[in-house]
Image: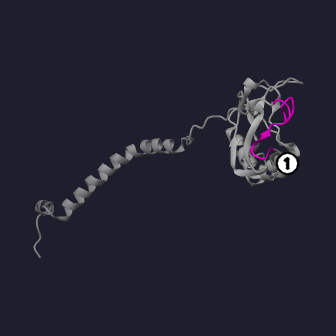
Amino acid sequence: MRVLPPNQHLQRAGAPGSTIEWLAREAEVVQVLCARRIQTPAAEARFVRRRRRPTQMWPFRAKQSAVALPVAPVPTTNFLSFVAPREVSSLGELPGEAIAALVEGPMPSGSAQVVPDAVRPNRVFIDFMHEVIRARAPSDPDLRAAAAAQWDGWVYVIDLRTPDGPQGRVPAEDIIGGFQVAHGEILADTYVPNEKHKVYTSNGLVRLPPLLRAAFVEELKRCKPGR
């Protein structure tokens, strides 16, 4: 084994790749780490302080007390019908065919009567009324008796509100419609509605003869409510 002089040993030991060089580099690394370690406690303190900061919640607004807002009044619809409340109960609801007319504006108080200008006839009611008359009037005993007395010509369904009655002077607004008569028989297919008839006049709401009124209410049972 060859022994080198001390200085030469140190010189050779410091050569690249030698153990001494490795140890020297390790010492430098330790010194750098120590230098960094000196600054670490302050950084860790800042990190700890940030983590201990209370968590902020979503900024929900405080619940406000309810404020009563003005409510607009619900408009009221006034209408006219000759169907009695007990008959409406048997129907369940009041079909549109039973509403003879709508009334514009407030209803009069007390015994005051609705003025005709405020009344708007319901076309659905009018068409349904004529449909019932066309189907049921030819079998009405009173109308059949009038046809037998007439023999030939026309018989008319008269609105019973007319002031002088069916046998008196009847204005055109109180004639609901008519059938042609031949040899004392009513020709059912000849019914003609009177376009001049008014659902409501100063004499009141339309009034059908008793049997036709009963037939009208009976036929309402096949109508859909709210139509």
Q: Amino acid at mark 1?
A: Ala
Q: Residue at x 78, y 25 (%)?
A: 106
Boundaries of the magenta span: 150-169
Relative to residue 24, is residue 126 depicted above or below? above
Task: Check if residue 156 falls in the magenta segment.
Answer: yes
Q: Residue 120: percent from the left, percent from the top?
A: 70, 31
Relative to residue 60, is residue 71 depicted above or below? above
Which residue carries the number 1 mark? Answer: 145
Please tell me whether mark 1 sits on a helix, a strand or a loop.
helix
Which colour scheme appears in the figure?
A: one colour
Of the pair 99 and 37, the residue shown nearer to us: 99
Relative to residue 199, is residue 25 depicted above or below? below
Instruction: Name the quadrant containing residue 163.
Output: top right
Instruction: Name the quadrant containing residue 18.
Output: bottom left
- Tell me if mark 1 has few (under 14), some (14-19) or many (20+) residues whose alpha carbon lies within 10 angstroms of its own: some
Q: Residue at x 78, y 33 (%)?
A: 174
Q: Residue 2: percent from the left, percent from the top?
A: 10, 73
Q: Residue at x 73, y 34 (%)?
A: 197
* Principal secondary structure, stretch drawn in magenta: loop
Of the pair 170 and 196, the residue shown nearer to us: 170
Of the pair 197 and 14, the residue shown nearer to us: 197
Task: Check if residue 76 falls in the magenta segment.
Answer: no
Residue at the bottom extreme, as displayed: 1
